[in-house]
Amino acid sequence: MREVWRYGVRVTRSGAPYGHVGCYHEAAYYGSDAEFLAIVIPFLEDGLAASEPTVASFAERNVALVQRELGATSGVTFVHAAVRYQTPATTIRADTAAFARYVAQGALQIRVVGDMPHARTSTSWNSWARYEAVVDRAYDG
């Protein structure tokens, strides 16, 4: 039986999960709200429990799901996906600046989870594919 996934979510963490040093970036796919929440809620809760800067970047529907599960005042910083994922270059620039601010404030780990951008053309898909290929190195600093 072939599974068909409708949506993807990107999970990024600085630091050393599983002994890894630097940026650790994964993609996960889900086909229902329950599967989405099963991926992102433990990741966010673990970041909050560890007092790590914890950022979520979703479309409004997924923001509502997460806020309903965690509470609107959970401590997660929400950045609207349409703002965060304008282009790969603007995403890397904005994330790098945000990560630098968190590190300057003393953060040792930073957690980010967000919707995977939905490419509208093959050109934009290619640019996001290149983003996925280089993002770990781009954020390692």
Image (cartoon, rainbow, N blue to C red):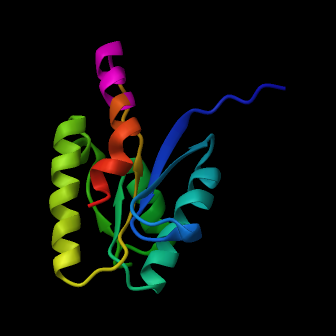
- Residue 125 falls inside the magenta stretch: yes
Q: Residue at x 15, y 60 (%)?
A: 97
Q: Which residue lies most toward the right here?
A: 1
Q: Residue at x 18, y 82 (%)?
A: 105
Quadrant of the frame with the C terminus: bottom left
Main secondary structure of the magenta stretch: helix
- Observer-nearest of 17 and 34: 17
Q: Residue at x 22, y 74 (%)?
A: 102
x, y percent for residue 136 = 38, 50
Name the quadrant containing residue 87.
top left
- Residue 11 falls inside the magenta stretch: no
- Left or right placement of residue 118 versus residue 11 in this view: left
Is residue 42 visible in the rendered image? The answer is: no
- Left or right placement of residue 70 versus residue 139 in this view: right
Is residue 65 visible in the rendered image? The answer is: yes
Magenta span of residues: 120-129
Name the quadrant containing residue 6.
top right
Q: Relative to 85, is 39 above or below?
A: below
Q: Residue at x 22, y 55 (%)?
A: 95
- Observer-nearest of 22 and 38: 22
x, y percent for residue 130 = 35, 30
Q: Which residue lies most toward the top here?
A: 122
In this rendering, the count of numbered labels is 0
x, y percent for residue 124 = 29, 22
- Observer-nearest of 92 and 7: 92
x, y percent for residue 69 = 51, 69
Q: Relative to 11, is 16 above or below?
A: below
Quadrant of the frame with the N terminus: top right
- Observer-nearest of 71 and 103: 103
- Left or right placement of residue 114 versus residue 103 in this view: right
